[in-house]
Image (cartoon, helix red, strand yellow):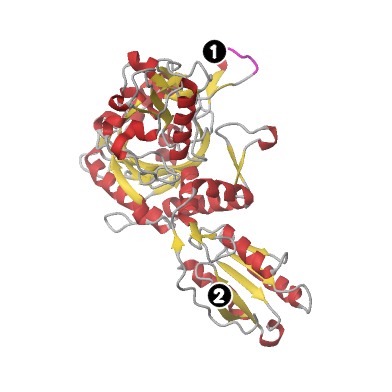
């Protein structure tokens, strides 16, 4: 080890394919993410971030805050944009949600299964239609429902269970015919549209022919009904309708409520932005896909207030800016795409405006397709108009920089990113299969995003090596998130740091007392380089800045 030369890591087959079950297992085993309340059996839709997970999440959050608020982007005119930050209350006056439309319209279509007592979002349930010409005449073969995102092998198990219950011989091929193909660890992907339909597109009188996602027999699904997603709570000592309040379902409204405070007190001029990072809560009917769709999550949102005539320009600016930002934090551009919302899926606040674009990521459970990571929406002047109407407080902006001076309600461009989903995207992007390593994989985080930046490893716990290693650790820990790791043999320590994504393992070996140098192992290539002790800090700092 002491005379280690640079070792090339070549002729090694590395796969970018992400097995979701292994990623979830790694997150628990290495302290990224745990099921909430696990000792009591957990609670569906809630997750806890462990020691490494909170470091990763904070790295992503702090990078967003730095790039949006501390050093905002340079605008089209070559000048830095004006963006300020707020941190608003999770519980606001209930009138907030009346004005925003959440009480009346923030609901999902929900269906119940009378057999299993489970509940599903109707728009998340897909139905496989049988090829009746190939089926035995009796008993009648039902359609088979599954929750969008269900792995292929689980759908096949479901069909086998139904076949056994009904006493018929059917398989997945009988439902999708010549389009059958296996996509390991992925949702069923069927090219012929009529073979797979959303439940919402099926006539209610056909529900008697559908087997629910977890049921054994057809006809157990109820008709869809509206289900409000907001969590209710009570404020004060008296529990009645007058004390009813809600946990916020989004962070945006707290920004709109403080729009006038910011305009009046912070010397900002339109166009400007207000940013916020915080928790939001939605009582999802079917939380699923790990932390992708959960009931408690974090958002990174910015509301950009601009003149209505400039909304299209700023919409295009923020769309490009936000897509490139995800690439900057280590998400491959090949796994990102932009998707323009169709007219029939636009939110109520965007229907008369420029529209909405989603930045989508190819998550393991959506591959080869994509899932929403961030949305850029033109909210028009909907929110300010609604709050002006319900509060009777004027929200107009007075612009005295033009002649004649003018008053107007700004339009809003909203880049709204999921911090929790962002963490999942970064985790999935980093997971790299490598059969040449003892760990069989490594987490290829961009160094600046990695939870632990460097690990100081004394080769043996004697001969003065721990003292040298500890001195280096005490110096490094003030500059970067650094671990001192002296447990197990060096190979096991390398394997652990591969699994948690540490970019640099710095080994103090038996040659260090003689040459005052250490061996730095590079995570991605496993190459090693000898570096002088007094150059280690600068070496790591330069690498992290790249």
* Dot 1: element: helix
Q: x, y percentage for residue 239?
A: 61, 14
Left or right of residue 159, residue 178 in this image: left
Q: Is the Cβ of the residue at disc 1 closer than 8 Å to that at disc 2? A: no
Residue nearest the observer in this picture, 247 or 438: 438
Q: Earlier in the sequence, mark 1 or mark 2?
A: 1
Q: Is residue 444 visible?
A: no
* Dot 2: element: helix
Q: Is residue 79 above or below residue 198?
A: below
Where does label 2 land, which residue? 538
Q: Is residue 199 above or below residue 466?
A: above
The residue under the point 71% across, 81% down is: 510
Q: Is residue 454 above or below residue 414?
A: below
Q: x, y percentage for residue 208?
A: 39, 15
The residue under the point 56% across, 83% down is: 5
Left or right of residue 379, residue 276 in this image: right
Q: Residue furthest bottom?
A: 514
Residue nearest the observer in this picture, 115 or 93: 115
* Most common SS among magenta residues: loop
The residue under the point 29% across, 59% down is: 78
Where does label 1 land, which residue? 241
The span picked out in magenta is 237-242
Q: x, y percentage for residue 310?
A: 24, 43
Left or right of residue 497, residue 468 in this image: right
510 magenta-colored: no
Q: What's the distance in space between the residues labelled 1 and 2, CA to CA?
A: 61 Å
Q: Quadrant of the C terminus?
A: bottom left
The residue under the point 44% across, 54% down is: 17
Which tag is nearer the camera, tag 1 or tag 2?
A: 2
């Amino acid at each position: 080890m002491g005379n280690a030369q640079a070792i090339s890591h070549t002729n090694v087959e590395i796969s970018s394919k992400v097995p979701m079950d292994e990623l979830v297992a790694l997150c628990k085993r290495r302290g990224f993410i745990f099921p909430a309340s696990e000792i009591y059996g957990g609670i569906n839709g809630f997750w806890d971030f462990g020691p490494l997970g909170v470091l990763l999440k904070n790295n992503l959050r702090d990078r967003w805050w730095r790039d949006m608020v501390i050093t905002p982007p340079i605008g089209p005119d070559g000048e830095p944009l004006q963006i300020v930050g707020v941190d608003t209350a999770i519980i606001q006056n209930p009138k907030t949600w009346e004005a925003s439309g959440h009480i009346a319209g923030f609901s999902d279509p929900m269906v119940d299964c009378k057999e299993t007592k489970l509940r599903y979002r109707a728009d998340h349930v897909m139905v496989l239609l049988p090829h009746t010409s190939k089926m035995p005449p009796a008993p009648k073969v039902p359609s088979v429902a599954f929750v969008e995102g269900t792995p292929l092998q689980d759908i096949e198990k479901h069909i086998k269970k139904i076949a056994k219950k009904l006493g018929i011989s059917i398989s997945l091929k009988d439902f999708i015919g010549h389009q059958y193909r296996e996509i390991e660890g992925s949702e069923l992907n069927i090219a012929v549209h009529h073979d797979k339909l959303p439940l919402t597109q099926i006539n209610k009188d056909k529900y008697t022919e559908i087997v629910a996602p977890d049921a054994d027999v057809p006809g157990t699904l109820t008709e869809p009904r509206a289900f409000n997603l907001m969590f209710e709570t009570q404020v004060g000592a008296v529990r009645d309708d007058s004390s009813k309040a809600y946990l916020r379902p989004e962070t945006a409204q707290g920004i709109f409520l403080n729009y006038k405070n910011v305009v009046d007190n912070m010397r900002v001029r339109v166009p400007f932005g207000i940013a916020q990072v915080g928790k939001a809560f939605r009582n999802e009917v079917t939380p699923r896909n790990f932390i992708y769709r959960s009931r408690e999550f974090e958002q990174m949102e910015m509301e950009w207030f601009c003149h209505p005539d400039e909304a299209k320009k700023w919409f295009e600016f923020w769309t490009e800016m936000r897509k490139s930002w995800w690439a900057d934090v280590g998400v491959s551009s090949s796994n990102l795409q932009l998707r323009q919302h169709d007219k029939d899926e636009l939110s109520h606040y965007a229907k008369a405006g420029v529209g909405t674009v989603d930045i989508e990521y190819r998550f393991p459970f959506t591959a080869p397709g994509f899932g929403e990571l961030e949305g850029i929406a033109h909210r028009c002047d909907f929110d300010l108009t609604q709050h002006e109407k319900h509060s009777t407080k004027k929200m107009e902006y007075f612009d005295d920089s033009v002649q004649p001076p003018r008053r107007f309600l700004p339009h809003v461009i909203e880049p709204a990113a999921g911090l929790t989903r962002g963490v999942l995207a970064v985790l999935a992007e980093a997971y790299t299969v490598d059969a040449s390593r003892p760990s069989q994989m490594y987490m290829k985080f961009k160094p600046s995003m990695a939870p632990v930046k460097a690990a100081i490893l004394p080769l043996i716990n004697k001969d003065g090596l721990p003292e040298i290693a500890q001195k280096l650790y005490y110096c490094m820990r003030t500059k970067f998130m650094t671990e001192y790791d002296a447990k197990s043999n060096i190979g096991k320590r390398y394997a652990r740091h591969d699994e948690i994504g540490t970019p640099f393992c710095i080994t103090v070996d038996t040659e260090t007392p003689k040459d005052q140098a250490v061996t730095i192992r590079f995570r991605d290539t496993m190459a090693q380089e000898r570096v002088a002790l007094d150059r280690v800090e600068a070496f790591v700092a330069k690498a992290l800045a790249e």
